[in-house]
Image: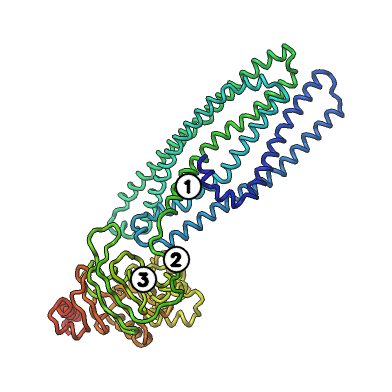
Amino acid sequence: MKVFLELGWFFKQEKKAYISGIFLLMLVALLTLVPPKVIGIIADHIHDGTMTKGILFQWMLVLVGTGLSMYVLRYFWRIMIFGSSVKLSKILRDRLFQHFTKMSPAFYQKSRIGDLMAHATNDLQAIQQTAGAGVLTLVDSLSTGGFVIIAMAFTISWKLTLICLIPMPIMAILTNWFGTMLHKSFHKAQEAFSSLNDKTQESITGIKVIKTFGQEQEDIEDFRKQSEDVVQKNIVVGKIDSLYDPTISIIVGISFFLSIVFGAKYVLNNELTIGELISFTTYLGLLIWPMLAFGWLFNIVERGRASYDRVAALLREKVEISDKDNALDMVPCGDIQYRLAEFTYPGESRPILKDISFSLNKGETLGIVGKTGAGKTTLLKLLIREFEGYHGEILFGEKALQDYKLVKLREAIGYVPQDHFLFSATVAENIAFTNPSAEKEEIEKAAALANIHKDILQFTDGYQTIVGERGVSLSGGQKQRISIARALLMNPEVLVLDDSLSAVDAKTEEAILSSLKQNREGKTTIITSHRLSAIQHANLILVLEDGRIIERGTHEELMEFDGWYKEMYLHQQLEELVEHGGH
């Protein structure tokens, strides 16, 4: 029952609803005592020959009134208790989602998407059941069972009641044992479901790759094995769960046997009437539900406890990137300065960046080039505070990045990553993601700057074309340019293009860069690229190798130096010449 204590914060929050619901639930439990008593009274009247139409009609009215009262009370307690449990699910779902949005990339590198989805769906459903059906079962089983035992002991025979309760401690011991096993097994079943969820999400997302390499059957077999594992682990849960009902039925059967044997003896000794024995056995029948409910209670609670443990552990994950006290509530503007001694990714031992030092004046363009893995993207991610923990400082407008509120810092930076993510929405909605209130003209202007406007007009529904999940219906170049348009719509102080022109041809690249130069006067631009033609116009070019700056300067300055930049530029020029047939 530990999970009820852990959910104490919510029960306090919804105490009015729960107290009212529990009170009505206990009234229903009291009213269930009426029919057995009425049956016993009527039986005694029949046995004594004193039954009349008036007496029968009187007790029939009592039964009808009891039934109607229970009907109304059950309606209202369900709204109060089950309605509150739905609120709990919503609160936890909101907390999880907000927590997900605050977590750094390091968190998502170690967490599986399918697992996170399982937390937000399957686990929350189990917790909701605990706060709804769990509370119902606990209160109803205790109140109904308690009231029935009190009625049996004080209105019929305390001796017979004690005799019938002799098997109960055995049931308590066994159900507790089953509950412990159920908790462990359900935890494993939930983990298996998370793995299957992750496998499904991964396979659907990568279906093109799977089909390209002809791995459909292998993937299906892998899915089948994981699905079978989920089934087997849930069968174990089901086997343990199925022990409750037979165990309780045996205990109840023993209690019935004792009540009939000893009850008949008391009737023969005139210690009980026939009607009282009938009432007693009817009450004993009412005890079946609380006993069965205890079995269900352990099932619900152990499932809820396992799920709450998983969700709570996730919510305890530390938010690595957050605002410091008194952070500036303003959008940064001005020069950018890097003074980094060293940066190492969390969990890694080898530094990815070393001795990075440069200044970029407001309105200038910075080009960053280098081999794959040289540290180009890492340099940019530090600017938008996706990672921290570096030795040194990064200044924006003569203030450290940490001095600004994170949301304000990112309002100043339009970042277009290498991996272009488009939502399953219209083209217009994807472009307007950074400014949902943007007018049609603003959206089209941003698209024109990104050299994608004409392409969009050729789509089936123009700007209202649904791009499909992750932009599946578009080419790589189209996705890149829509992503650039999305960033441009922000009109950011700093535009960061992280190898974002790799999928467009040289002519389109030139058109985009020309548009940016004309329309972003006075604004800073940072471009990383493998194609040097994209950055040769930059005011400053940095060449990275193994996380260090090995060359710096303008295009002209670097061409005078016989280094990596000059060699790569001439190589790319030769490739382009060959592609055009030597002309």
Q: Is residue 482 left or right of residue 441?
A: left
Viewer-side residue, 44 vs 304: 304
Q: Quadrant of residue 269?
A: top right
Mark 2 crowdedness (10 Å alpha carbons): few <14, some 14-19, many ≥20: some
Which picture quadrant has residue 334? bottom left
Q: Name the amino acid type tagged 1.
A: Tyr
- Say which mark, if any, is on residue 384: 3
Instruction: Decide: few, some or many residues near mark 3? Use Cα within 10 Å; few <14, some 14-19, many ≥20.
Output: many
Q: Which mark is residue 424?
A: 2
Left or right relative to 275: residue 215: left
Which is more toward the observer, 354 or 54? 354
- Reading the image, the residue beneath label 1 is 308
Q: Given this view, does label 1 or label 2 mark the residue nearer the observer?
A: 1
- Of label 1 and label 2, which has the lower sequence position? 1
- Residue 8 bears which disc, if any? none
Q: Secondary structure at mark 2?
A: loop
Badge 3 marks a residue whose secondary structure is loop
Q: Is residue 147 left or right of residue 524?
A: right
- Identity, as a three-letter code, of the amino acid under mark 3: Ile
- What amino acid type should be assigned to the residue bearing mark 2? Ser
Q: Point out residue 382 in the picture as x, y percentages from the top left corner.
A: 32, 69
